[in-house]
Amino acid sequence: MSRVIVLDGEGKRLADCTRERAETLLASGRAKVVSADPFTIQLDAVVPLPQPKAEEDPLRGKRLLLHICCGPCATFTVRYFRERGAEVTGYWYNPNIHPYSEYLKRRETLARYAEEIGLSVFWEARYDAVEFFRRVAGHEAFGERCALCYHLRLEGAARFAAEGGFDLFSTTLLISPYQNLRAIRALGEELGSLYGTPFYFENLRRGFAEHHRLAEEHGLYRQRYCGCLYSEWESLDPNAPTRRRPRDG
Ligand code: SF4
């Protein structure tokens, strides 16, 4: 039986459920459908997570380099890390966004938002789309190519964090229920060890609903596909050969 993605009232991803269970929750009014593909429901209820005491918080007083994939994903994430006491600097490096006009649109959206919230961002000038396509050549299937895509972007962040003397680095990808957090964590930790700046991991999916609200409040452009040419194709064509089942993790 196919599984259904379940989010709590704040957008945090919970354990998946069966279609039957989802239909029961929908019929009782305790959940609503937020995405048809992958089939995702959101509960009314919020499942609270324990927060560390301020004085024990590993982010408190730390210089954090945050890889940012787009303006909307930066909204909740930057606010959350700042609230935890981190000094956040953004880092833009996304050669996975195609076509180039879309890349510029997302970059401009983040630039405007960063100015609004007083966030300094380091902008990698190089686009590196050719490097992206070289790396994923022969590995175009969803999931497989994503691991290579994460590696390319996180390696840029890890290298820059080490050169800039940051205490930690992380990524706004951690807010998305459509990204593979297990793979991102493993790669982030591996690259952190390699370059010498630890990767900060936390499942931020509970902020997913709030990030939508904030993006709307600030009038940010919201894209309809993840970023690469393949994801755009898959968003329009259910039979695209690169498509696979939704990520877990
Ligand atoms: S779907 Fe998203 S994460 Fe996967 S390769 Fe494309 S842009 Fe990268």
Image (spheres, rainbow, N blue to C red):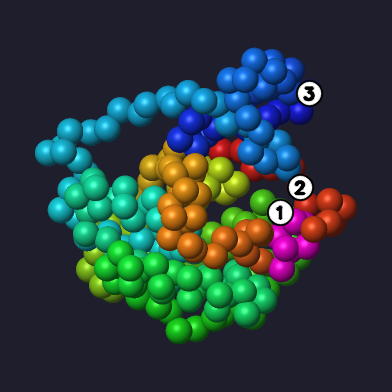
Between 246 and 206, the one lying in front of the other is 206
Please provide percent x and percent y for residue 70.
49, 64
Q: Residue at x 56, y 75 (%)?
A: 105
Q: Answer yes or no: do the residues labelled 2 and 1 have beta carbons within 8 Å? A: yes
Instruction: Tell me the tag on residue 10.
Output: none
Quarter placement of the N terminus: top right
Please state which of the two labelled residues, at mark 1 or mark 3, is closer to the viewer. Answer: 3
Pointer 3 local density, CA inside 10 Å: few below 14, some 14–19, many at least 20: few
Q: Answer yes or no: do the residues labelled 1 and 3 have beta carbons within 8 Å? A: no
The amino acid at mark 3 is: Met
Instruction: Tell me the tag on residue 142.
Output: 1
Q: State yes or no: Cβ of the residue under disc 2 lies below 8 Å from any atom of ligand 1.
A: no
Residue 206 sits in quarter: top left
Q: According to the image, label 2 marks what residue?
A: 244
- If you read the primary sequence from the N terminus, does the residue marked by circle 2 or circle 1 appear first? 1
Residue 120 sits in quarter: bottom left
Q: In the image, which residues are magenta?
A: 229-235
Q: Answer yes or no: do the residues labelled 3 and 2 have beta carbons within 8 Å? A: no
Please provide percent x and percent y for residue 119.
29, 67
Q: According to the image, label 3 marks what residue?
A: 1
| Secondary structure found at label 2 | loop
Task: Name, please, the residue furthest toward the right.
Answer: 239
- If you read the primary sequence from the N terminus, does the residue marked by circle 1 or circle 3 appear first? 3
The amino acid at mark 2 is: Arg
